[in-house]
Amino acid sequence: MCQWDMINHLVGCLFMSIAERVLQVQQQIRDHAQGRSVTLVAVSKGQQPAALCAAYQAGVRDFGESYVQEAVPKLAALAHLSVQWHFIGPLQANKTSVIARHFSWVHGVDRERIARRLSASRLEAGLPPLPVCVQVNLSQEPSKSGVSLQALEALVREVALLPGLRLRGLMTLPEPTSSTALQRQRFAALRQEQERLIRLGYDLDTLSMGMSGDYIAALAEGSTIVRIGTAIFGERINT
Ligand SMILES: *Cc1c(COP(=O)(O)O)cnc(C)c1O
């Protein structure tokens, strides 16, 4: 790239609209998904409804929110749009009922107690089983959410039995690294866990992995859902 091309490129990035970024991410997904069908979840935490509308107009039909209190009014404001809401944040016991009623997917199931509560709330609400992923902590950091690799199979066994949930697969949120090799190594580890569980008889069709900084690597390792925030909406200010 010559100097002027580079400057043009940077200016273009600064002024690119949400719609243009959505198209760019969708193109990257097509280029790297190896023919799989991959769901783009636009992570809209910290964004105003107008930003979500712009993404919707560009074709986004799945949005990801992390905080119940922030999400519920937004869901109400955008109730006229036909979208699927994914809950991707940490799960608290006192929020499971609201989540089970308002969301179409939950990505971060990592404890049996929470899974039971979600299942019970879903049944109480008379809604069909809630699609969920079990979140796996691959780096084994004690502070992070997610079940350890050692405890994964036991949790999967419990979640698969709950009548109000439909266990779809695994999710991970690795700590950021710019090393593509390291990114791929972690995502490959999640895929290997999925394959192992499938051999044990579990019906898992989903790998929820890949964010703005690492989704190309995740797609190369078999991701079926990518969760993209900043690459679509720009840097978050408040969250
Ligand atoms: C915020 C968040 C994302 C999106 O992160 P970006 O780097 O902005 O793409 C994805 N997944 C989870 C669980 C998140 O909390």
Image: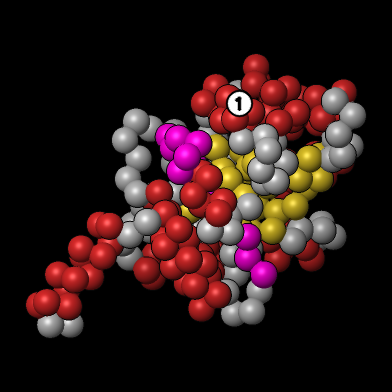
Residue type at mark 1?
A: Val
Residue 202 placement, left or right of 88: right
- Which element carries disc 1, helix, strand or loop? helix
Number of labelled discs?
1
Q: What residue sits 28% from the left and 62% below the top?
A: 13
Q: Picture coordinates of residue 28 (x, y %)?
A: 47, 72
User: Is residue 56 a member of the stretch shown in magenta?
Assistant: no
Q: Picture coordinates of residue 114 (x, y %)?
A: 70, 28
Question: Is 32 rendered above or below residue 171?
Answer: below
User: Is residue 41 a member of the stretch shown in magenta?
Assistant: yes
- Residue closer to the observer: 61 or 225: 61
Question: Is 16 rendered above or below residue 230?
Answer: below
Q: Picture coordinates of residue 123 (x, y %)?
A: 88, 29
Residue at the disc numbered 1 = 72
Quadrant position of the N terminus in the picture: bottom left
Q: What residue sits 76% from the left and 45% below the top?
A: 131
Q: Is mark 1 within 8 Å of ligand 1?
A: no
Q: Residue furthest top?
A: 94
Residue 64 appears in the figure: yes
Residue 175 placement, left or right of 167: left
The range drawn in magenta is: 37-51
Q: What residue sits 64% from the left and 79% below the top?
A: 35
- Residue closer to the observer: 114 or 238: 238
